[in-house]
Amino acid sequence: MNVIVNHQSVELPDPASISDLLFTLKIESPKGIALAINDEILRKDRWNEFLFSENDKVLIIKATQGG
């Protein structure tokens, strides 16, 4: 299945979960990450139940430190 992550195509298994996406992208920890799926923020308490559909658009925002 194809999803668009930060404007780039990513191939995932079907069905695919948030865990599958993070594994594919080699993101080891979800700390400091926010996700929007099709322009709607997905709360972390819903990550375990969410399954992607073909061509979903995902925006990953990573918190950074600095000042």
Image (tube, rainbow, N blue to C red):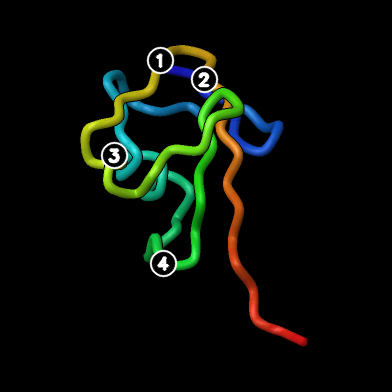
In the image, is residue 27 above or below residue 25? Answer: below
Task: Tell which circle, 2 or 3, labels the residue nearer the N-terminal end.
Answer: 3
Viewer-nearest residue: 5 or 11: 5
Q: Helix, strand or loop at disc 3? A: helix
In the image, is residue 15 above or below residue 30? Answer: above
Horizontal and vertical percent position of residue 28: 38, 64
Using the image, tell me which numbered label, if any, was put on residue 56: 2
Q: Residue furthest bottom?
A: 67
Camera-side mark, 1 or 4? 4
Mark 1 lies on residue: 53
- Name which residue type carries label 1: Ser
Residue 50 shown left or right of residue 29 in the figure: left
Horizontal and vertical percent position of residue 43: 39, 44
Distance, label 2 to label 1, CA atoms, is: 6 Å
Q: Quadrant of the C terminus?
A: bottom right
Camera-side mark, 3 or 4? 3
Q: Residue at x 54, y 37 (%)?
A: 36
Using the image, tell me which numbered label, if any, was put on residue 31: 4
Q: Residue furthest top?
A: 54
In contact (CB < 8 Å): disc 4 and disc 2: no
- Name which residue type carries label 4: Lys
Q: Helix, strand or loop at disc 4? A: loop
Viewer-nearest residue: 51 or 43: 43
Distance, label 1 to label 4, CA atoms, is: 24 Å
Distance, label 2 to label 3, CA atoms, is: 16 Å
- Name which residue type carries label 3: Arg
In contact (CB < 8 Å): disc 2 and disc 1: yes
Using the image, tell me which numbered label, if any, was put on residue 46: 3
Task: Tell which circle, 1 or 4, labels the residue nearer the N-terminal end.
Answer: 4
Distance, label 3 to label 4, CA atoms, is: 15 Å
Q: Quadrant of the N terminus?
A: top left
